[in-house]
Amino acid sequence: MSTSHHPRSWVTSANGHPDFPLQNLPFGVFNRPGGSRRGGVAIGDFVLDLQVAYETGQFKGEARVAAEAARKGQLNAFFALDATSRQALRAELFNLLAEGSPQQQALQLLGDALLVPMGECRMHVPAHVGDYTDFYVGIHHATNVGKLFRPDNPLLPNYKYVPIAYHGRASTLCVSGTAVKRPSGQTLPPGAEVPTFGPCKRLDYELEVGVWMGPGNAVGESIGIAEAGQRVVGFCLLNDWSARDLQAWEYQPLGPFLSKSFATSLSPWVVMAEALAPFRRAQPKRPEGDPQPLPYLFDEQDQAHGALDIELEVLLQTARMKEQGIGAHRLAVSNTLNMYWTVAQMVAHHSVNGCQLQPGDLFGTGTLSGPQVGQFGSLLEMTEGGKHAIELPSGETRTFLLAGDEIILRARCRKEGEVSIGFGECRGVIVD
Ligand code: MN
């Protein structure tokens, strides 16, 4: 694939970079050793310090207003801006960092004051998350999990009408690289009539995409489907760690509670909606016989362009694999085209009752499994509820996660004639 006609960056590591070429420019919050938290933009192997860029007067007009908000230690004020302000900053960053930029020499003179080697940066959750909601729009995951409980009737009757979700816990969202402590809780051992208390024995991951909310709505108002897509700032990877044995005992009738609220990992970079524009697709056609979405969830434009084509990957590396120098083992590949509902439908549904959404609110899509073996986004599905262990290149086997296991999520967008972009990684190691 030739991409030679696409603009390149004078930050040479950006050209051909698997995640962060000039065409991506994701936003995040970082600090360098001993430094304060501030906004940054990933470009190749570097983080552009937005505080320094702002203070040295690199931005003008609307882009300067947006940079003033984005340079801070949390991106909420930036997320609150309307899409045109965001786009102005993105356009100016693109011009500043492109080969042949009139500012190139001046920017290069700033050296690592402006462009910090990514390896020296500590990343943070990029915004204060007021509320976190985890959806269930991966229809193959919903079907696979439903089959474990109801082989003849895996999907409940509401699934094709309602974008199902549960309210998650914002306080335990953590950035990639944070260790995940195995939770304890109540479980009902097989055949037992009363529960026992102890460490979770069926610890699992969920391969999901995170959705960062931009401008929200007032209490009592709602965001219509036609404008809902515009209210989303960007996307990240999300691992909804799940204690399956706690979940099985507690989930009826109100859904997941302590089985999910102990940790949720996020990749640190917010891949902006604008960067994903080339990878928009038509929402896949619903199977024959499925109902049409109700009118408040149906929009022609959203159906024509509201889906995303993002390749997803989940890998596992155990402590023994690390000791033996064995690289991470790929467990599954999937794609965001496995979403039964679009992101705009999620936003429209969430707010239709007058529930307030705010800048920096976070949605999870739900586990994004594909229909085939090799495309399952959780161990629950891969092992059919723990019945079949998976084999690893170290000779180890797993049904669920053990101490020292590291789960790595990755995502990439590829399209003929476009420069590929990636999301970076979402990592977490289990500790007991
Ligand atoms: Mn989930």
Image (spheres, grey):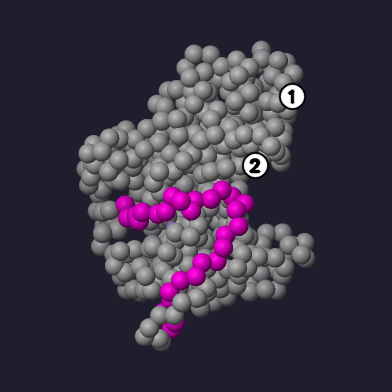
Q: Nearer the viewer, residue 82 or 99?
A: 82
Residue for point 48% across, 67% down: 243
Task: Tell me which segment is drawn in magenta.
Answer: 163-190
Residue receiving disc 1: 111
The x, y position of residue 302, in whole percent, is: 34, 38
| Residue 108 falls in image quadrant | top right
Residue receiving disc 2: 122
Query: Can you say whether 80 is above or below 263 in the image?
Result: above
- Real-space Cα separation, disc 1 to disc 2, in angstroms: 19 Å
Query: Can you say whether 281 is above or below 261 in the image?
Result: above
What's the mark number on residue 163?
none
| Residue 20 falls in image quadrant | top right
Residue for point 44% across, 50% down: 170
Along the horizontal axis of the image, is 291 left or right of 279? left
The x, y position of residue 255, in whole percent, is: 34, 63
Residue 425 in view = yes
Q: Is mark 2 within 8 Å of ligand 1?
A: no
Query: Who comes first in sequence, dot 1 or dot 2?
Result: 1
Mark 2 crowdedness (10 Å alpha carbons): few <14, some 14-19, many ≥20: some
The x, y position of residue 266, in whole percent, is: 53, 49
In what element is the residue under mark 1? helix
Give, as a three-letter code, the residue at label 2: Arg
Q: Nearer the viewer, residue 405 or 290?
A: 405
Query: Can you say whether 9 is above or below 318 in the image?
Result: above
Q: Quadrant of ligand 1?
A: bottom left
